[in-house]
Image: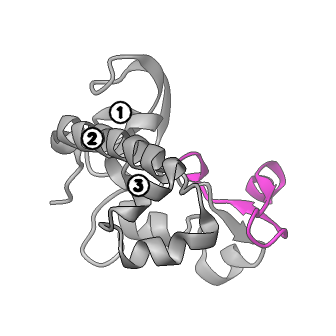
Amino acid sequence: MEYEANNSAVDDQTGGVGIMCKNFILCETVLPEWWFDCKGRYLCTNCHMLFGTWGTHTGRGILDVVEDVECPVCLEVKRSVLQPNCEHTMCIDCFKRCRYGAETVGPEFPRPDIEDEYDDDTDNPKWEDDYPSIKKYHQEYNKWDDEQKREYQREKKLAIYEP
C-alpha cells in the first residue's frame, strides 16, 4: 500500500516499526503494522475519539494541514491545521497547547535521597534552615509556579471546547 510505504516509522515506546497515524504531526502516534487490517483506517484511537466520528462527534477525523497561514492565536505565519469541526485554522504549536495543554516541568528537587521525607513534611522550617539547596529549590519552584499561574491566566481563554 502506498500510504504504508511512505509513512513507516519506528515506535519510540516499543521499538517496532509501524505506520504513522494520519494526524502524526499532532499526536506523534505510530500504529502497529496490523492496524489497518483491524481498524480499516490509519487513524489512532485518540485522534478518532478527539477529531473523528467516535460516539456523537461529527469531526472529519484526519485534520488538514495548510502551509503559511497566520495563526489567530500567536499571530505568526506558520504551518497550520484546520480545526476538527470547522474551517478555522491555528498553527500546530498553538493547537497542541490549546488541545492538550502546555507541557512544563518544574525545577528538579536537589536531594533525591531525602525527597520522600521532604514530601511528607514540606512545611517544616528545617528544610530551609538546614539545607541551602532546598531553600534555593523553593525559590526556583515558587518562581516557576508563579509563571505557570500567569501563563494559565493568559491562555485560559484559548482552550478549545467541544460542542
97 or 52: nearer the viewer: 97
Pointer 3 residue? 129
- Which of the 4 quarters of the picture holds residue 74? top left
Task: Kindly report the distance in space between the C-alpha atoms of the residues bearing marks 2 and 3.
Answer: 23 Å
CA gap between label 1 and label 3 equals: 49 Å
Give the labeled residue for mark 2: 146
Q: Is tag 1's residue or tag 3's residue first in the polypeptide sequence?
A: 1
User: Helix, strand, or loop for circle 1?
Assistant: strand
2 and 3 marks in contact (CB < 8 Å)? no
Nearest to the observer: residue 59 or residue 125: 125
Label 1 Cα neighbours within 10 Å, binned few <14 / some 14-19 / many ≥20: many
Sequence-wise first label, 2 or 3: 3
Dots 2, 1 in contact, CB < 8 A: no
Give the number of the mark in front: 2 or 1: 2
Circle nearer the viewer, 1 or 3: 3
Disc 1 designates what residue? Answer: 90
